[in-house]
Amino acid sequence: MRLTKSTDLALRIAMRLAVLDEESAPTTREVADAVAVPYSHAAKVATRLQRLGVVEARRGRGGGLTLTPAGRTGSLGRLVRALEGVGDVVGCEEDPPCPLRSACRLRHALRTAQEAFYASLDPITVEDLVATPTGPVLLGLPPRPTTT
């Protein structure tokens, strides 16, 4: 199973925010630069994380992004499920629909594997992900030069 680029970026943003002290509230641009992604993509993902209650975003002077307590200690499996959405690993219903769909065992097997993947993430939190050695590396990420 492969996560979407948006989910990957959401997890990297959450991890970056998790290593910063409570008073730090980097802008979306600063976070985008630190994790080396385009600002526009980071802004969309940050908005999604805010809607999910993982990130708090404050606008204006002194504003920025912070990880919420739920974002810090919530289940990684729950977060990835929310980010990835509900759906099958394979496109049985796509146009044209798969001719095997009424008798196929593959779809069920892949759905079971997908749930096992998510279940393996359930006991893990973002806080767990930033334990040593990852946390110090995240703190040491140099900001990428911003191009305008």
Image: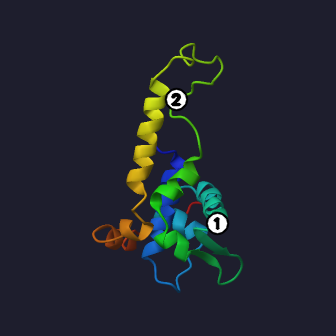
- Quarter the N terminus occupies: top left
Residue under the image location 65 percent in, 73 percent down:
57
- Which residue is the extreme one toward the front? 103
Residue 111 % position (x, y) = 48, 36
Residue at the spot of label 1: 50
- Labels 1, 2: front one: 2
Instruction: Name above or below for residue 1 compared with residue 74.
Output: above
Crowd class of label 1 (few under 14; some 14 to 19; many from 20; radius 10 Å): some
- Whether residue 19 is visible, yes or no, is yes
Residue under the image location 59 percent in, 46 percent down:
85
Indicate the amino acid at tag 1.
Gln
| Cβ atoms under marks 1 and 2 closer than 8 Å | no
Crowd class of label 2 (few under 14; some 14 to 19; many from 20; radius 10 Å): few
Instruction: Name above or below for residue 113 compared with residue 106.
Output: below
Residue 117 % position (x, y) = 41, 46
Mark 1 secondary-structure assignment: helix
- Which residue is the extreme one toward the right? 60
Instruction: Name above or below for residue 127 compared with residue 35.
Output: below
Residue at the spot of label 2: 90
- Whether residue 9 is visible, yes or no, is no
- Residue 13 disc label: none
Residue 83 % position (x, y) = 57, 52
Along the polypeptide, which appears first: circle 1 or circle 2?
Answer: 1
Indicate the amino acid at tag 2.
Val
Mark 2 secondary-structure assignment: loop
Direction from residue 140 to residue 25 in the image, left or right: right
Residue 84 % position (x, y) = 55, 47
Real-space Cα separation, disc 1 to disc 2, in angstroms? 29 Å
Give the number of callouts: 2
- Which residue is the extreme one toward the left? 133
